[in-house]
Amino acid sequence: MAILTLVEAKKHFNDPVAAGVADTLVSVDPMFEVIPAIGIAGSSLIVNQETTGGAAAWYNTATSTLIETAADAYAEPNASTARTFTLHPVVGQAIVTKFHQATSAASGVDQLAMQIASKARNIGRMVRTSLVSTVSYAPAGLDQFAGISGVTQPSTTDVFECLDALMDGVKSKDGQVDAIVVNEEVMRVIRRCARARNQHFEYFTTPVSGQNILSYNGTPIFRNQNIAAEDGDDKSWIYALNFESGGNDGLALIYPDGTNAGIEVNVYGESEIYHADTARVSQICGWAMYNDDGATSMQLDTTDLV
């Protein structure tokens, strides 16, 4: 499977308009700069996730033969479970009246192009929302993945100990954690606690736009305001995760193989029923978690955190 980020994938787009839409999607959320995008065949992906690893053991060189039975420490097989992830379309249709197109063109503005860009931004927001929130007809995200287990907030008032416990729950890359995702309320708490301790802020610089993203122990903290807060903003879900790297270890954005990352732009010209030009922007995509141990969540109560 080819693993590219959306930014890398657009270099291979044969449609410059679709490439422009990809740029617009990335501008909505810097996380799109680093999330891997993987093309799949068909409308869904079945991943056989490893639940227990195949065993290995130190071998006694005095033993002349390996007795290969499941009872032997070195011969015990791994176990796996199947997870299915499906593709879903998100669509935006632009309708620009002939009057507005003509009058805007006179001042050097392509109204239809502006509408296409606006629809692309909204598609990016819809995809971002689906990652952390249940949305009708949208793909399942972090809050719905069947095998993702959460961790309990430790009994401490130290916000950074809470982040440590969250990150400890991600095990697919043996301690490496690629991203933390929180809403704006939790982001403010993290900043407030760091300032109260006179701690220097750490930053992760995104590879394309060069944005400085707040990080913790080298792991970028991405803001996603679609994570709902509860109890008067005092409780929020937070997530830590890895990205898929080819070793069945994390999250990826999936799309139909052979397409421009699932992005399609159709300009239809004059409408049959309106005195207007029409265009349609769509993206067919979904989320896939290649390893249940590649992500975890915590319901964080920020009331007494310092």
Image (tube, helix red, strand yellow):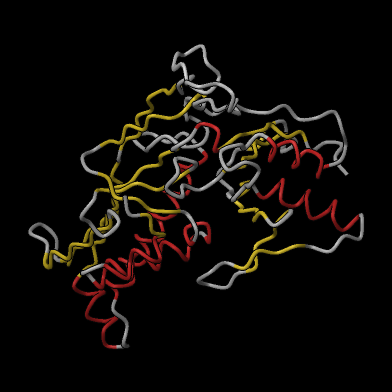
Residue extending farthest to the bottom is 107
Which residue is located at x 84 percent, y 55 percent? 194
Residue 67 versus residue 106: which sits nearer the camera? 67
Residue most extreme to the left: 272
Query: Which x, y percent locates residue 19?
Result: 31, 69
Q: How many marks?
A: 0
Q: Residue at x 44, y 40 (%)?
A: 248
Q: Is residue 283 left or right of residue 81?
A: left
The quadrant in which the C terminus is found is: top right
28 left or right, relative to 20: right
Q: Position of residue 218 (x, y in %)?
A: 69, 57
The residue located at (34%, 29%) in the rendering is 84
Report which quarter residue 85 is drawn in: top left
Point out residue 226 in the picture as x, y percentages from the top left corner.
55, 44
Is 77 drawn above or below residue 97 in the view shown?
above
Residue 31 is situated, as x and y percent measured from the top left of the image, at 52, 57
Question: Which of the pair 146/235 is nearer the observer?
Answer: 146
Image quadrant where residue 281 sits: bottom left
Compared with residue 142, is residue 206 higher up or lower down, i.e. above or below? below
Residue placed at 51% from the left, 36% from the top?
142
Is residue 268 found left or right of 160 in the rendered image?
left
Q: Is residue 241 above or below residue 37?
A: above
Give whichever of 267, 204 is nearer the camera: 204
Look at the picture and state if 18 lies above or below 143: below
